[in-house]
Image (cartoon, rainbow, N blue to C red):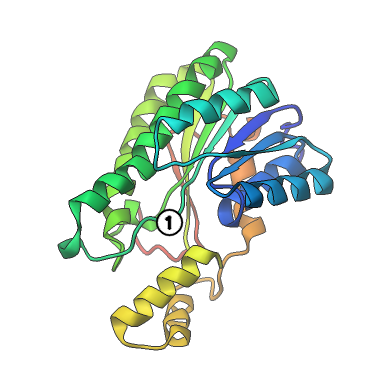
Amino acid sequence: MDLKLRGKRALLLASSKGLGRAAAQALAGEGAAVVISASNLDRCRETAAAISQAHGTTAVPIRADMFVPESMDRLFEQAQAALGGVDILFINHPGPALGLAQDIDVTVLERQFRLMLASPIRLISRALPAMRERRWGRILSVGGAGMVTPLPNKAMDDTLRPALAGYSKALANEVAADGVTVNIILPRTFVTDRVRHSTAANAALWGVSVEEAMRRRIEGIAAGRFGELEEFGAVAAFLCSDAASYVNGSIVRVDGSQIKSVF
């Protein structure tokens, strides 16, 4: 299927590795120009060079610190200058701090709020006016299972991700008539640095080996395996395409039926 993304311009947060990189690769594979953004500039440069070489598209590395919402203004200005505009905004961030609800430190919560909500919303506010004027835009955020069911040892996810879901749905209702879609792609277990880290933390919490904690994770997946990053990227690219223009205000799971709830 030709997703008709050739010539589109995408700014992707936290895209130098893992799920963000998978989305960038999929979009570039469909002909979109991409900005690779993360806090590590060297990693951004490596990823951008690899994507450009593999797909023959423009891939620009830009460093940005999502813990500083004001830096989103500079990121957007640089991305707009490099690409000539932003049609697709992919919202992603590093995995939030792990921990129990009873142990939440408000200082840490405020810092995570900047990462998970303040910076994304600030960046969206910069990109949205031009999308509405062009009557075409895609805002796609990476969610987490904490949006639909509380996760053990992930109180920050459980607290802040539902807020992003509420914001995204409210925004979709406001801009759908302008040709802008606002969706959330909800992955579950893909083998990333975040999964390795959280599995090790769970192993310590449960008093088992990392291997046993990993086995338990696979045991809870109906598909019987972890997801491949290319599978995530394919869904992300589809949700950014014209083919998905009537998918709006939605949470789309890419989880091998790991999440047990109906809604």
* Up-down relation of residue 20 to residue 133 (above or below): below
* Residue 12 screen position, x and y as percent: 58, 39
The residue nearer to you, when weighing 74 against 259, is 74
Q: From the viewer's perspective, tell me whether residue 49 is left or right of residue 136.
A: right
Tally of marks: 1
- Find residue 79 and report its image quarter: top right
User: Farthest residue toward the left?
Assistant: 102
Q: From the viewer's perspective, tell me whether residue 231 is left or right of residue 215.
A: right
User: Farthest residue toward the top?
Assistant: 133
The residue nearer to you, when weighing 75 against 92, is 75
Give the residue at x 37% y 74%: 201
Q: Residues within 10 Å of mark 1 (few under 14, many from 20)?
A: some
Residue pointed to by mark 1 = 95
Element type at mark 1: loop
Residue 148 visible, this orientation: no
Give the residue at x 77% y 36%: 31
* Residue 110 screen position, x and y as percent: 25, 45
The residue nearer to you, when weighing 263 against 90, is 90
* Residue 141 screen position, x and y as percent: 47, 41
User: Which quadrant would the N terminus be assigned to in this image?
Assistant: top right
Q: Which amino acid type is shown beneath numbered disc 1?
A: Gly
* Up-down relation of residue 204 to residue 119 (above or below): below
- Find residue 97 and report its image quarter: bottom left
The residue nearer to you, when weighing 68 against 238, is 68
* Up-down relation of residue 85 to residue 60 (above or below): above
* Up-down relation of residue 262 to residue 238 (above or below): below
Give the residue at x 56% y 23%: 77
Give the residue at x 84% y 40%: 56
Q: From the viewer's perspective, tell me whether residue 210 is left or right of residue 110.
A: right
